[in-house]
Image (cartoon, grey):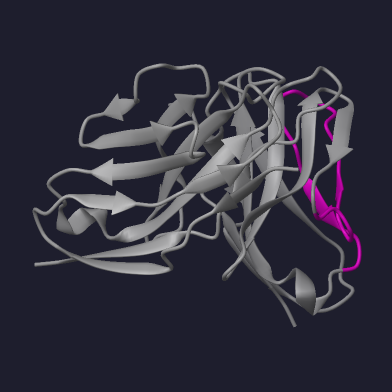
Amino acid sequence: EAQVTQNPRYLITVTGKKLTVTCSQNMNHEYMSWYRQDPGLGLRQIYYSMNVEVTDKGDVPEGYKVSRKEKRNFPLILESPSPNQTSLYFCASSPSSGPLTDTQYFGPGTRLTVL
Amino acid sequence: AQKITQTQPGMFVQEKEAVTLDCTYDTSDQSYGLFWYKQPSSGEMIFLIYQGSYDEQNATEGRYSLNFQKARKSANLVISASQLGDSAMYFCAMSPQYSGGGADGLTFGKGTHLIIQP
């Protein structure tokens, strides 16, 4: 089954404790992206990757890191999480390196709480 | 910069009625894509429908249609014969023109919470 998977689905952590949210897609998509969703703000892009070893900042990159060592994986790293990073996080992928006409397929979401 | 505006934070609609969810957008790009996503209470984002800026016909997908009025910069979602399972958050989004120098992904509106009443 074609899908985007994220782990963990739920995470409660404390300020400053490094964490990684994994994202994997099995559709051989070039483009991958991370979004965060906050009440009243919709979804905002954190980082995106157009292909292996190519990543760039989205609208809200502060406090986050990403890597794209393999085509299928795009982990999101919070080196020192803070309470303002409490949010619902989505990973997404699309077939080509430009999203103009391609639907982005979303993972199930990771609900993160930073205490 | 692109911007999406959804002016209806919430809507209550009677089952079986048609629903129109409003979306207006702002962009300086000549070529762009418009999307609608559904987010049920379980949280996942479900793609509903896509409209390209150069598509002359309005997109349709089953009970969903997109009323695209380019001159007015609007891309309203129409759900015909609403069902209880349509209750969810609905997000309008747009994608920028791909220039080769970067791809900024989707810009989302703040969403409309649709509740279908029996």
In front of the other: A70 or B18: B18
Q: For the magenta stretch, what is the residue range?
A: A60-80
At x 64%, y 26%, the residue is: A99
Q: Would residue B8 appear left or right of A69 to someone viewing this image?
A: left
Q: Say whether residue A13 is magenta.
A: no
At x 12%, y 54%, the residue is: B17
Q: Is residue A56 above or below residue B100?
A: below
Q: Residue furthest front?
A: B71
At x 83%, y 53%, the residue is: A77
Dominant SS of magenta comes to loop
Residue B41 visible (yes or no): no
**The N terminus of chain A sits in image quarter:** top left
Q: Would residue B62 appear left or right of B15 to someone viewing this image?
A: right
Q: Say whether residue A71 is magenta.
A: yes
Residue B35 visible (yes or no): yes
At x 81%, y 55%, the residue is: A60
In the rendered image, residue A102, in percent from the top left (x then y), is placed at: 56, 22
**The C terminus of chain A sits in image quarter:** bottom right
The picture quadrant where one finds residue A52 is top right
In the rendered image, residue B97, in percent from the top left (x then y), is placed at: 69, 24
In the rendered image, residue B113, in percent from the top left (x then y), is placed at: 38, 65
The picture quadrant where one finds residue A101 is top right
In the rendered image, residue B6, in percent from the top left (x then y), is placed at: 49, 57
In front of the other: B31 or B71: B71
Q: Residue furthest bottom?
A: A115
The picture quadrant where one finds residue B60 is top left
